[in-house]
Amino acid sequence: MNVFSLKKSKGYAYPLTKPKYDKETNKEHPYLQEINGKTQAFALCPACHNPVILVNRIVPQTKSNTLYAKHCKYNVTDLANYDQNSYENCSLANPTNFDEKIKRPLNHATNDIIKDAIRNHFDLLIYHLESATGILFSEKVLRQILKDFESCQGYFYHSINLFNLPIAFLYVVKSQDLSSCKINSDIYNKINIKSKLFTFQSNSNFGKTNFSIIPKNNSLNSNISFYLYDHTLSTEYTEESVTLCIIEKTSNGSYEKTLFEKVINFDGAYYVNTLNKRNKSNSLARSIIT
């Protein structure tokens, strides 16, 4: 995993870099401990709160030499005791590819966590998805994505957890109609020249410019759609990416063209931390306001 947590802020996900780890732990016990004559670096898993050990922090231990954390299935003195049940329910344990579509048991704790994040914080999920893709989704498209996600029971997928939920939410569903959505300047600059079937109209709101999509006069029987594909996990599961694709085609299938592709490297730590902060604030309000 490429995140870690600490006793002082259990559940908060810090991006895992050596400077960040050293700064937040002050390079002190119980995070740095000498075991069998070697200094080992530990932290907590943000999801299950079990101890994790850092790999490749100082001395290369794998070919990639990439810094990452992995669960350690033993107690770490003064830090945390290992809990097997928590590990088995951990959303960050044993990550898999979205395309494998392996499902968790029906009673797995992560299933309800995913449902809660969608039901009660859908606006936050969409904010992060729109920021990552550059697409401003219409209510029509959001409604369809929700229906498709529910139809495929995406909340049961072993590969989906809170840290990748925004991109997973769109990845596991079919391609969606882009014509009712708006796009940002980056996408517009790439597809404006390429598109034969659509034109674009600029809109400005609160200092931000986006573009509506309009069929050309002779292109009423055409469509423009988008989807995510090529979910990729790095060797040590420290990086996760998907590719956004936008295509246009005629309804009769006589013409099809890829207008835009972009690799999205998604960092879920900010999303999860914001979600947890909201939950704490909401719990505080409910405890006082009856």
Image (tube, grey):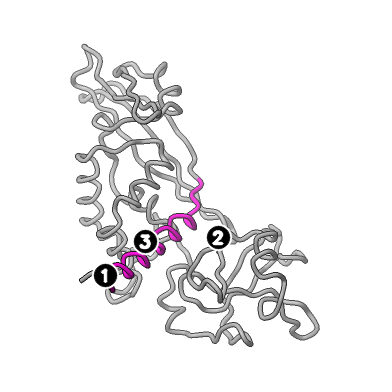
* Residue underneath mark 3: 278
> Which dot, 3 or 1, sits closer to the camera?
1
Residue drawn at x 55%, y 69% is 5
Specify the quadrant that holds the C terminus: bottom left
State whether residue 22 is above or below residue 86.
Answer: above
Q: Is residue 261 visible?
A: yes
Local SS, label 3: helix
In x, y percent, where is residue 147? 20, 51
Q: Amino acid at mark 2?
A: Tyr
In x, y percent, where is residue 59? 77, 66
Q: Main secondary structure of the magenta part?
A: helix
> Observer-nearest residue: 28 or 190?
28
> Which dot, 2 or 3, sits closer to the camera?
3
Q: Which mark is residue 237?
A: 2
First in sequence: mark 2 or mark 3?
2
CA gap, disc 3 and disc 1: 12 Å
The extreme right residue here reads 37
CA gap, disc 2 and disc 3: 27 Å
Residue drawn at x 58%, y 86% is 74
